[in-house]
Image: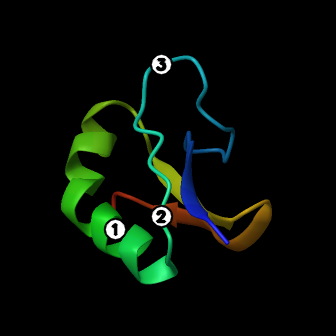
Amino acid sequence: MTWRWRYEDAKGGELTDRPLPREIFSSQADAESWLGETWRDLLETGVEQVTLMEDERVEYAGMSLRQA
């Protein structure tokens, strides 16, 4: 199992038009800890919300970075 964040605009569309971190994590906890440390930087680059993916399965979607 691998975990990753999908970066999205405010409407939930995946952002693919800019260089963003493509970190892969071995656990959900590691992914969530990383996001806790980097959400401000992501917001500054135009990421409005994120979706946590386990392989290709959505764990949870549409988490706003503006409420973090």
Q: Residue at x 59, y 31 (%)?
A: 15
Q: Who comes first in sequence, dot 3 or dot 2?
A: 3
- 61 or 1: nearer the eye? 1
Give me the C-alpha separation between circle 3 and circle 2.
Answer: 21 Å
Give me the C-alpha separation between circle 2 and circle 1.
Answer: 23 Å
- Say whether residue 34 is left or right of residue 14: left
- 59 or 43: nearer the eye? 59
Label 2, on which residue? Answer: 25
- Say whether residue 35 is left or right of residue 59: left
Q: Residue at x 74, y 69 (%)?
A: 58
Q: Quadrant of residue 29?
A: bottom left
Give the structural element (helix, strand or loop) at label 3. Answer: loop
User: x and y percent of residue 9 in the render?
Assistant: 56, 39
Mark 2 vs mark 1: in front: 2
Type of amino acid at the residue the image marks with label 3: Arg
Give the structural element (helix, strand or loop) at label 1. Answer: loop
Give me the C-alpha separation between circle 3 and circle 1.
Answer: 23 Å
Give the structural element (helix, strand or loop) at label 2. Answer: loop
Q: Is residue 2 above or below residue 9?
A: below
Type of amino acid at the residue the image marks with label 2: Phe
Q: Residue at x 61, y 25 (%)?
A: 16
Type of amino acid at the residue the image marks with label 1: Gln
Number of numbered labels in the structure image = 3
The circle drawn on residue 67 is 1
Query: Dot 1, how many residues are within 10 Å of its Cα: few (below 14), some (14-19), or many (20+)?
Result: few
Q: Quadrant of residue 51?
A: bottom right
Q: Are marks 3 and 2 in contact (CB under 8 Å)?
A: no
Q: Who comes first in sequence, dot 2 or dot 1?
A: 2
Quarter of the figure that contains the N terminus: bottom right
Label 3, on which residue? Answer: 18
